[in-house]
Image: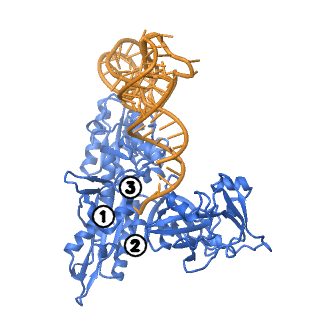
Amino acid sequence: MRFTKTFIPTVKEVPADAEIASHQLMIRAGLMRKLASGTYTYLPAGWRILQKIMDIVRDEMNKAGALEISMPMVQPLELWQKTGRDVDYGETLGRFTDRHGRGNVLMPTAEEVVTCLAAGEINSYKQLPINLYQINAKYRDEFRPRFGVLRSREFIMKDAYSFDVDDESLDKSYRIMYGAYCRIFRRCGLEYVIVEAETGEIGGSGSHQFTVPCDNGEDVIVYTEDGSGAWNLEKAPVDPAPKQQAPKNVPDTEEVHTPNVGSIEAVCDFLKCKPQDMIKTLIYSAGPDTIVAVIRGDHDLNTEKLTGAVGGKHIELADEPTIEKVTAAAVGFAGPMGLTEKVNLVLIDPAVAAMAVGITGANKTDYHVKNVVPGRDFALEGKNIKVVDIRNAVEGDTHDGKPLLFRRGIEVGQVFKLGTKYSDKLDAKFLDAEGNEKPCLMGCYGIGINRILASAIEISHDDKGPILPITIAPWEVIITPAGTGTEITDAAENIYTQLAEKEIEVLLDDRPDIRAGVKFNDADLLGIPVRVTVGQKSLAAGNVEIKLRSESESRKVALASAADEVIATVNSLKAVLNVGN
RNA sequence: CGGGGAGUAGCUCAGCUUGGCCAGAGCGCUGCGUUCGGGACGCAGAGGUCGCAGGUUCAAAUCCUGUCUCCCCGACCA
């Protein structure tokens, strides 16, 4: 490709609305432009990168035996109502009504559609296992798109769905995908961490997340130093805190007047206590049921763990009228005492159960209660009371006695065992060898294509631009003629032709009247791993220069052998990243 | 959805407090010339309904009201 025949609008200035490196550099390198919040147009260089990523994904998926299909991006709302996910997904699900009044959704993922397909077409165990995938645009009406393409409304995702006859077979399908994912991310040049994950709204029994450690990531990875465990924050288990020694003869509970002091912070300020002395009481709704979650004041509730503790039901914070009805007080003054009878379930975090004494809301507007002893002043056991881990791990927590460490990461892929959640609801059944009708056992497997690009830039860039792995760079080689004169342009053209003939992906910066400095900067900004500089200085001695984007020094090679040298360099860079081929 | 910030030339921004001068700068863009190995320089030029709609005023980019969009923090989120 010639620079003058393509369209790569690089810019010097940092765009005002780009906060993180990957976003800024993707705009500056002319890879993409924003259309609206969370939606981007990919320009030729950016689209080339995405296509190269998709090629790698496609290659590994095909090798793993998965079959590529394409499902509609507009799907009937009715199908989502059958699985209840129209409710679970909530506002994130993009919807519209067509001219006939039919409800439609914009595909955020495709479990319903693919299961519906299986329900119609899979009848026999002889057709299983099967794994179907697609790579295309997905839409989620995010509350708050941010960080460029890391959380956008429209994005490209590879989503695969496996169907198996039994658990053993599902395990095998899952492991095959797990292995394919390792090879995909490796080939894309990403250092990644695999963490145990919660399954969220998508449902199911087991899941791993593939995460690229990076300070700008939205996910929190929790791990033990010895590497024996890694989880995302939603899943990270926490050892129960040791029971605190109760001071002798804690006085009876005492109500204290705390006018207009509702938040934990305000109460601490008012009563001169610390958040860890507080007991926080949160009221949740799960359909018609009301659930009380009790955690220590300095802890955060983990909605995934809470969802698990209520058997996977969809939960949300109760609305104000419900809270007022249950606590008989304004919002901000809830406490666990006396609530047991009024609600369906009380869940108490072990850290609260371990407290010797604490302060809670009084279930009375403008009042809190001191000297509250868990177990004495409110029950820790009972038919609708459970002590269970429902909070996020924090610094200082342990698992199996080992300290938990924290670091941020970008989620680039996730694999799930779904089981029969969708096949039950959508009737995806088959006859086994004995003639018994059984639901298909499903797995689903996603990869964020755009996130692979963004995370590659996040973890590898300098002040000049991205330093891209050769497997996903828009071009493998850029030829930069530095200076004018036919001798230079002829030599550059000559190398360009030779490389193109050998199917090296090469970009020739043939822009006339552009100073060398500008060309060098654009080459760096594009992150192209190998640069060939053809200039007067070296050419006088019969040489050109080869420079790696990742290194600061160039080396001189004879013009005559330049193409061969470049090919050898490209191959050695590729060899590092290619797994088993 | 709560809190904060911002919309003025293609981009980055100044001007607004205290209404009135011709609506400005840098970058980019067009032409000519000089340069030519790390974002050169000179000269000449094109380019703006000051987000939108009302209002106040002799007069509004500037003051008031409404509205839309974008960004950040939070909440939320496969």
Q: Earlier in the sequence, mark 3 or mark 1?
A: 1
Instruction: Answer with left or right where residue A4 lies relative to residue B70.
Output: left
**Label 2 sits on what residue type?**
Gly
Q: Which chain is orange?
A: B
**Label 3 sits on what residue type?**
Glu
Label 3 and label 1: CA atoms lie apart by 13 Å
Q: Earlier in the sequence, mark 1 or mark 2?
A: 1
Please tell me which residue lies in front, B69 or A47. B69
Please tell me which residue lies in front, B8 or A363. A363
Which residue is the site of mark 3? A91
Which residue is the site of mark 1? A80
Q: Residue furthest bottom?
A: A434
Name the residue located 60 percent from the left edge and 57 percent from the top edge.
A332
Q: Residues within 10 Å of mark 1 (few under 14, many from 20)?
A: many
Label 2 and label 3: CA atoms lie apart by 22 Å
- Residues behind callouts 1 and 2 on a single chain: yes
Instruction: Answer with left or right where residue A377 lies relative to residue A188.
Output: right
Query: For residue A204, which numbered disc appears in the image?
Result: 2
Q: Residues within 10 Å of mark 2 (few under 14, many from 20)?
A: many
Q: How is the image coloured?
A: by chain
- Name above or below for residue A239 compared with residue B18: below
Instruction: Report in which chain the residue with disc 2 lies.
Output: A
Where is the N terminus of chain A found, in terms of image quarters? Answer: top left
Which one is closest to the eye, mark 2 or mark 3?
3
Q: Which chain is blue?
A: A
Name the residue located 28 percent from the left edge and 43 percent from the top edge.
A496
Q: Earlier in the sequence, mark 2 or mark 3?
A: 3
